[in-house]
Amino acid sequence: QQQVKQSPQSLIVQKGGISIINCAYENTAFDYFPWYQQFPGKGPALLIAIRPDVSEKKEGRFTISFNKSAKQFSLHIMDSQPGDSATYFCAASTTSGTYKYIFGTGTRLKVLA
Amino acid sequence: NAGVTQTPKFRILKIGQSMTLQCTQDMNHNYMYWYRQDPGMGLKLIYYSVGAGITDKGEVPNGYNVSRSTTEDFPLRLELAAPSQTSVYFCASTEVGLGEKLFFGSGTQLSVL
């Protein structure tokens, strides 16, 4: 029940295309859902996050879609660029005071020029 | 403002050796975390701390120990290193009011041979 399942494991997209990464969770107590981006040799960095009171959040080319009833959320990268090539992790947490996260297994995205 | 600093960046240990992974942050964050990252497994929480003198176990604490004597430092101790501890270790921190954003260090790549 504490897992966050992420798919696909890897993704190859042409430049200008749309990249879509999906995550599913079981624990209905989760109330914060971030996406982290990680470049090789670096630590993850927060990309975008959503709370379950909204169904979509957009920041530039990055959009999170959230389906509370299905317990699923996804990251959409519009107009994907080679510089977006990285590993993406979804995560979930309860804002109960410890800020502990459960991370997905990661998606390695490669955007072809 | 260096953020979260981890040392060393790389280390090779022999089975049975011990070592301490150092983590320090200069942002006055109370919340600090140790994660390990294995290929295809995402990030797993080892230990976390909500303030100086307070630590607690995460998902995978076996074989590790931590201490938190100051707000800035959160070292991770490996006793009797085993090949299963070969991984990339990330330290992270956050604070109330930062939107639950985790700030990660650049990681320590550890091999136990």
Image (cartoon, coloured by chain):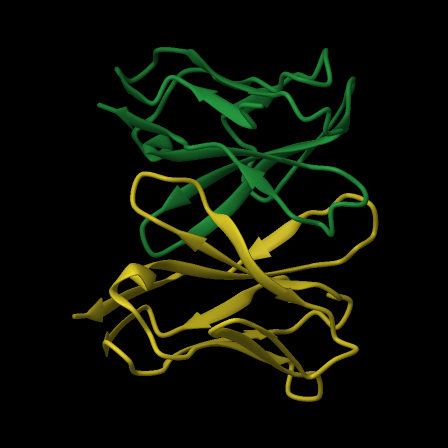
Chain colours: A yellow, B green
- For the question of whether residue A39 can be seen, the reply is yes
In the image, is A59 to the left or to the right of B10?
Answer: right
Q: Residue furthest front?
A: A60
Q: Residue at coordinates 64% horizontally, 87% vertically from top-left?
A: A70
The image quarter in which residue A34 lies:
bottom right
Image quarter of the N terminus of chain B: top right
Q: Residue A22 at what x, y percent from top left?
A: 47, 77
The image quarter in which residue A64 lies:
bottom right
Q: Residue A20 at what x, y percent from top left?
A: 41, 79
Q: Residue at coordinates 59% horizontally, 44% vertically from top-left?
A: B59
- For the question of whether residue A105 can be seen, the reply is no
In the image, is A41 to the left or to the right of A46?
Answer: left
In the image, is A106 to the left or to the right of A3?
Answer: left
Q: Is residue B38 above or below residue A110?
A: above
Q: Residue A6 at what x, y percent from top left?
A: 45, 70
| Number of numbered discs on residues | 0
Pick the residue in front: A30 or A88: A88
